[in-house]
């Protein structure tokens, strides 16, 4: 089948139905705007399973997502949406680029969840935007921006509690949203150890606790087992909360 689009971690294919697309999750991993490349064995299936479980669960809580079903372990059928060129990052604890850019110490608990918008543009290195820059670039309307902010905060509340029940601290994460044919905002892309920072509450050592893509970014080793650990805990917790 002809690809519609190939990203760093997923490939999008058209289907017989113009309203439905097929996403294939890859084992390929990149970091630092693809300057670092590698593979994480089994990542495609793991990220697909984690994302599917979390999307289904968020839907049950009233968050509209692009998720439809998973025809095979690394494939997800999704509603076709026009992806907004924004990466919406929510942070509960200081880490990553927030520490680099502000001097905050890694691990500092933020006084409130910080919502940030980055422009999805690899050539520009996904720059941090301001509200006015978003409006000047016309990547979202003021109303859409309000809705994105409140959805991101609501999703953070749900996910923070969910991961807490998995003995995992949700440090920060990135979301993408798209518009469906009616202009409704749907949560899209994925929610996985590629797109979240997840710290094991059973570990105090700042390296041993890392259960996410930082293991790959920072060459910490045991990347596959960290992803498997997240999958195991998420699926066990999903079994508890699903009826
Ligand atoms: P950052 O601290 O590097 O800005 O990352 C914040 C969060 O966003 C972190 O959970 C990782 C995630 N993220 C992505 O999903 N894709 C990206 O391209 C980047 C830079 C971060
Ligand atoms: N996914 C991004 C990239 O390859 C960055 C990251 O996740 O660190 O460039």
Image (cartoon, rainbow, N blue to C red):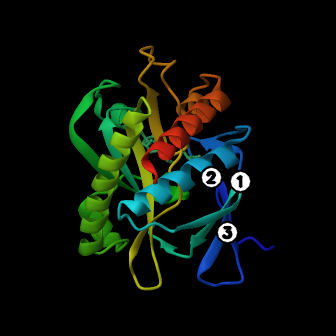
With respect to residue 163, does 206 lie above or below?
Answer: above
Report how far apart the C-alphas of labels 3 and 1 lie in the structure: 12 Å
Q: Which of the two marks, 3 or 1, is nearer to us in this view?
A: 1
With respect to residue 193, does 19 lie above or below?
Answer: below
Q: Is mark 1 within 8 Å of ligand 1?
A: no
The N terminus - image quarter: bottom right
Q: Residues within 10 Å of mark 1 (few under 14, many from 20)?
A: some
Residue under label 2, please give it: 48
Query: Residue sitting at 66 percent across and 57 percent down?
Result: 10
Secondary structure under the numbered disc 1 in the rendered image: loop
Query: Residue sitting at 34 percent across and 74 percent down?
Result: 138
Disc ID at residue 122: none
Report how far apart the C-alphas of labels 2 and 3 lie in the structure: 12 Å
Secondary structure under the numbered disc 2 in the rendered image: helix
Q: Within the image, what quadrant is residue 59 found in?
A: bottom left
Report how far apart the C-alphas of labels 2 and 1 lie in the structure: 7 Å
Asked whether the beta carbons under mark 2 and mark 1 sit within 8 Å of each other, the answer is yes
Q: Position of residue 210 (x, y in %)?
A: 50, 26
Q: Within the image, what quadrant is residue 12 found in?
A: bottom right
Circle nearer the N terminus (2, 1): 2
Residue under label 3, please give it: 22
With respect to residue 194, does 181 lie above or below?
Answer: below
Residue under label 1, please give it: 73
Q: Residues within 10 Å of mark 3 (few under 14, many from 20)?
A: many
Query: Which residue appears farthest toward the left when viewing the image?
Result: 111
Query: Which residue appears farthest toward the right when viewing the image?
Result: 1
Circle nearer the N terminus (2, 3): 3
**117 or 68, nearer to the observer:** 68
């Amino acid at each position: 089948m002809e690809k519609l689009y190939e990203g760093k971690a997923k490939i999008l294919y058209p289907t017989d139905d113009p309203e439905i697309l097929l996403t294939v999750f890859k084992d390929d991993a990149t970091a630092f705007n693809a300057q670092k490349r590698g593979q994480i064995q089994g990542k495609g299936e793991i990220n697909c399973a984690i994302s599917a479980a979390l999307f289904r669960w968020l839907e049950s809580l009233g968050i509209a997502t692009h998720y439809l079903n998973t025809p095979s372990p690394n494939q997800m059928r999704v509603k076709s949406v026009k992806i907004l060129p924004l990466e919406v990052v929510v942070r509960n604890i200081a880490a990553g680029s927030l520490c680099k850019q502000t001097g905050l110490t890694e691990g500092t608990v933020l006084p409130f969840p910080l919502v940030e918008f980055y422009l999805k543009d690899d050539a520009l290195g996904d720059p941090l935007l301001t509200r006015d820059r978003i409006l000047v670039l016309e990547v979202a309307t003021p109303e859409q921006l309000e809705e994105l902010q409140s959805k991101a905060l609501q999703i953070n509340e749900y996910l923070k509690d969910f991961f807490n029940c998995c003995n995992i601290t949700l440090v920060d994460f990135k979301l993408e949203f798209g518009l469906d044919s009616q202009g409704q905002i749907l949560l899209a892309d994925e929610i996985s150890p590629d797109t979240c920072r997840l710290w094991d509450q059973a570990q105090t050592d700042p390296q041993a606790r890392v259960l996410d893509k930082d293991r790959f970014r920072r060459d910490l080793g045991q990347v596959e087992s960290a992803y498997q650990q997240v999958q195991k805990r998420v699926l066990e917790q999903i079994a508890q909360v699903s009826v």
